Image: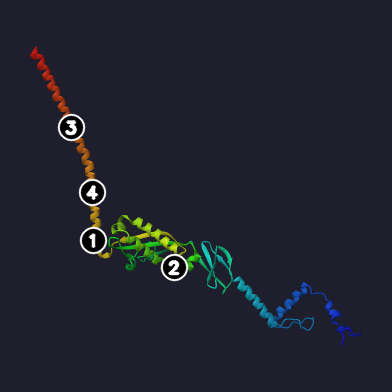
Amino acid sequence: MAWNEPGDKDKDPWNDKKGQQKPPDLDEAIRSFQEKISNIFGGGTGGGSGGSGQSKIPGGALGVMVLLVAAVVLWTVSGFYIVDEGNHGVETRFGKFSETTMPGLNWHLPTPIEAVEIVNVQKQRFIEVGYRSGGRERVSGSVPRESLMLTKDENIVDVRLAVQYQIKDAANYLFNVKDQTATLKQATESVERGVIGRNDMNFVLLEGRADIVADIKKELQTLLDRYDSGIIITDVNLQDAQPPEQVQAAFEDAIKAREDKERYINEAEAYRNDVVPKARGAATRKIQEAEGYKFRVLSQFESAFYFYLTHHHA
């Protein structure tokens, strides 16, 4: 049948009056949205006077859409995080390093695409090598497997060391070092054994402590930098260095003998410094007295000889 038959204008879609209607205004759109939300959460179909409802989205489908939108929004918002001062954030994408973030508000692609780990880069951390304690101030007994070391002159010493450090590169610290504390302890022990093995026992136990600490700190930092550990050594403390307990008494006797020897030498030096000047003074006085006596005797002799000559010839 032709579209433009006389008397049948309603069947012509191009002349349909409905196609000449204006788009609904904003208020009508809002009312429509409210009706749909009401249908979803209120369970009703809504009354309304505007037609048969064939243009409406089914309630179940709209509910799914709303839930999906809400889930996407929540998923997106979950990617925001705050890095406090003194911390760095290390972002990973599918388990691999992505970037390092600074203090402040940051965002990453939410789970399961990206994740973030916050690392404190200002905290002073420390490890104990050769001993264990309940804190930094109280030193307990040694751990022989870590503390006993061989010196250059083939003596055994018991050394207890505390190392303080900070994290300077959070990403390197997390990804380049496995079991960071154990690795740092092993590296410290290795460097310490090398330094102790280059020096004699007396140097390690007595006059060389400052040099030992400086060498350990320098060589340990060099080793850590070589492997990009992300760790910076801030301080090395030699808590104690002594012979093993089995020879401790003998070593203390040797130390006492050394101290006695030095004391006797000092006393002898003091005595010499006191006596020698006095002896020199006494010797000088004796010489001066002898010179005076000589002068007097010669003077008397000359006087007597002159007197004899003058009276004898007269």
Residue at the spot 25% in from the left edge and 53% down from the top edge: 259
- The earlier-in-sequence mark between 4 and 1 is 1
- The earlier-in-sequence mark between 4 and 3 is 4
In the picture, measured across the screen, residue 103 lies left or right of residue 23, that is left
- The earlier-in-sequence mark between 1 and 3 is 1
Tell which of 116 and 270 is nearer to you. Answer: 116
Q: What label does residue 265 carry, if any?
A: 4
Tell which of 313 and 287 is nearer to you. Answer: 313
- The earlier-in-sequence mark between 2 and 3 is 2
- The earlier-in-sequence mark between 1 and 2 is 2
Which element carries disc 2, helix, strand or loop? Answer: helix
Q: Position of residue 92 (x, y in %)?
A: 54, 70
**Amino acid type, label 3:** Ile
Which residue corresponds to mark 1? 250
Q: Is residue 90 above or below residue 276?
A: below
Which element carries disc 3, helix, strand or loop? Answer: helix
Mark 2 packing: few (<14 Cα in 10 Å), some, or many (20+)?
some
Q: What label does residue 180 carry, if any?
A: 2
